[in-house]
Amino acid sequence: MEVLDNYLGLSDDYNYTYDFLPTHEEVVFQHKPTCLKESMCVSLIVITAVIFLLGFCGNALVIWISVFRMKRTVNTTWYVSLAISDFVFCAFLPFSITYMAMEDWIFGRFMCKFTSSVMFINMFSSIFLLVVISMDRCVSVMFPVWAQNQRTVKKASLVVVLAWLLGIIMSLPSMIFRDVGSHLGKTVCFNNYTSLTSQKFVAGSRFIAGFIVPLIIIIVCYSIIICRLRINRMTKSSKPFKVMSALIVAFFICWMPYHVFVLLELNHQNYDYKTLTTGLQLGTSLAAANSFLNPVLYVFMGNDFKHKFKSCVLSRMENAMGEEGRTISRYLSRSSSVDGRASTHI
């Protein structure tokens, strides 16, 4: 079974395996899912389910804390946007989990295109936002007075909208080339490229625009920041950068294997099929894991998020315990009064 074409809508799905026209025999062929009998497929389902639960709940918590418990600033605007991107990504993972388990796409052509597009919107919007944040940090260090006067929440929100629009534009190939077809009695959701040239163009543009160029810009920005901090000996000012640095490192570690194996897939005839399949499976799993790593980094590395998280959790526990205590005391007072009345009657 080709698990690859079932996973997340991110991979190029070995398009060459679908260069055929469905025959009458394939239409009447009775498909029987075998995923739950294979350890690799079951592992992928479990991993994806864990990513969904952690990412969905974690990013929802980050959004709630940022919006309702923290003062709205330029920094919180960046982080809320990243959390929303990851939250939307995780919200669509159940479609992929169902597809992997059933080995049959039951959601129709539109959702085949739409779910894949959402995955890439998440990838591009996240990396574009990380680039914007890196440039924002660089400008703040190089021109602190100007940045203090010009950095506003309204302008940051406009930049976020532009980053999302650019991410949507870059994800259009998924809406164009993603398609459904019948294969051995099952409906598959795959990339129906018209030619190898179009496949190379899509893979190359994603690699350049979603990885190489952002990496270069971020490295340049952080090199300037580090040099500036060393020159001015601004040791205290370097603390706010640790969360951002961790987010950037996590993003590139999580997405690099995916891009590498997608590029290797373009010359699939030169590589072992099993190696490419396993590599893309692990690469897409690691890429999806980035969506739940971000809220973890917020909580454990960001002092503001850590403080707000602890205060929120503790206040909820105190309220719950206080409510329970008040309920018990009311119960005991009622019981004592009943016992008093009962002793009087006796």
Image (spheres, rainbow, N blue to C red):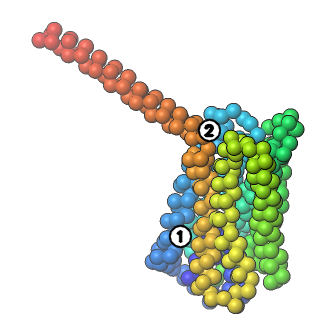
Q: Nearest the camera: 68 or 342?
A: 68
What is the number of the mark on residue 36?
A: none
Residue 62 lies in quadrant = top right
Q: Is residue 312 above or below residue 169?
A: above
Numbered badge on residue 304: 2
Quadrant of the image occupied by residue 64: top right
Q: Residues within 10 Å of mark 2 (few under 14, many from 20)?
A: few
In the rendered image, which quarter contains the C terminus?
top left
Label 1 – label 2 distance at C-alpha:
34 Å
Mark 1 residue element: helix
Q: Identify the residue shown where x is 67% and y is 71%.
A: 258
Q: Secondary structure at mark 2?
A: helix
Which mark is first along the chain, 2 or 1? 1
Kind of residue sitting beneath label 1: Leu
On screen, residue 227 above or below 74: below
Residue 170 locus on image (x, y percent): 81, 63
User: Percent x, y for residue 34?
Assistant: 49, 79
Instruction: Residue 193: tell me if it is visible.
Output: yes
> Viewed as shown, does residue 344 lie left or right of 122?
left
Say which residue appears at 68% left-offset and 54% top-offset: 245
Residue 106 seen in the current view: no
Residue lying at 83% horizontally and 57% vertically, measured from the top left: 166
Q: Which residue is mark 1?
A: 44
The quadrant in which residue 165 appears is bottom right
